Image (cartoon, helix red, strand yellow):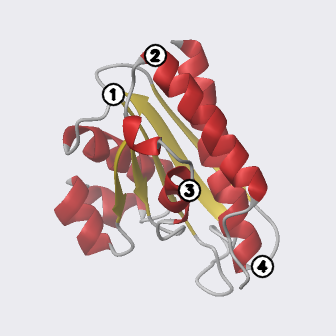
Amino acid sequence: MDTLITHDLTKLSSQLGLLLKDKSFTMALAESCTGGLASAAITDVAGSSAWFDRGFITYSNAAKHEMLNVSKKILTQYGAVSEETAQAMVIGALNNSNADIAGSITGIAGPSGGSANKPVGTVCFAYSIKNGQLITEEKQFEGDRKTVRHQSVTQLINGLMSLVHLI
C-alpha cells in the first residue's frame, strides 16, 4: 500500500512531540487541503495522545465556519485559501480545544482548482500560541497532489517547531 505518512513525517512529528512535551503543551490542528494528513502523521507517533489534543478537518467553507468560527466575511473577502482564513482557522482551533498551541493549513493541492492569482500548490499556514504569538505564511509548492500535500504537512510541522522554539 502506498502511504502518505512517510518516515520523514513520522520523524518530524516525533521531534515536535518532544518539544511540546518539554514545554508541557498540547496541540490542535485545523486542516483543509491536507484532509487530516497532518493529524495522521502526528498520531502515527506512539504516545502522541500526551501532546495532541485534537484535529479539525474543515475541507468545506461551511465546515470552517461551523467548526472553527471562520467568518463568512473572511471566506468571501479573502477566499478559503488565504493567510486571513488560515489565521481564523488557527484561532478557531485554539478556541474550540484544550490546546496551548495550534497550526492550520489551507490550500490548493490540485490537480485542478487553481487560478492565475492562486495557482495549484498555493498553501497558507498559521501557527499560534493560545493568547500569544500568531504567525501566518503563504508558500507555493510544486508537484502533483500527493507531493503538495506532503510538502504542506512538512511545512506545518516545521512551522510549529519554530514557534515552540520562540517560547
Q: Do the residues labelled 4 and 3 touch (CB within 8 Å)?
A: no
Mark 2 Cα-neighbour bin, 10 Å: few <14, some 14–19, many ≥20: some
- For label 3, the residue is 44
Q: Do the residues labelled 1 and 2 touch (CB within 8 Å)?
A: yes
Of helix, strand and loop, which one carries label 4?
loop
> Disc 1 and disc 3: Cα gap in Å?
21 Å
From the image, which quarter does the N terminus lie in? bottom right
- For label 4, the residue is 144
Of helix, strand and loop, which one carries label 1?
loop
Mark sitting earlier along the chain (4/3): 3
Q: Nearer the viewer, mark 4 or mark 3?
A: 3
User: Is residue 143 depicted above or below 101 in this figure?
Assistant: below
Mark sitting earlier along the chain (1/4): 1
Residue 67 shown left or right of residue 162 in the figure: left
For the residue marked with disc 1, what is the amino acid?
Asp
Mark 4 Cα-neighbour bin, 10 Å: few <14, some 14–19, many ≥20: some
- For label 2, the residue is 23
Q: Are marks 2 and 4 in contact (CB under 8 Å)?
A: no
Q: Residue 100, which numbered label?
A: 1
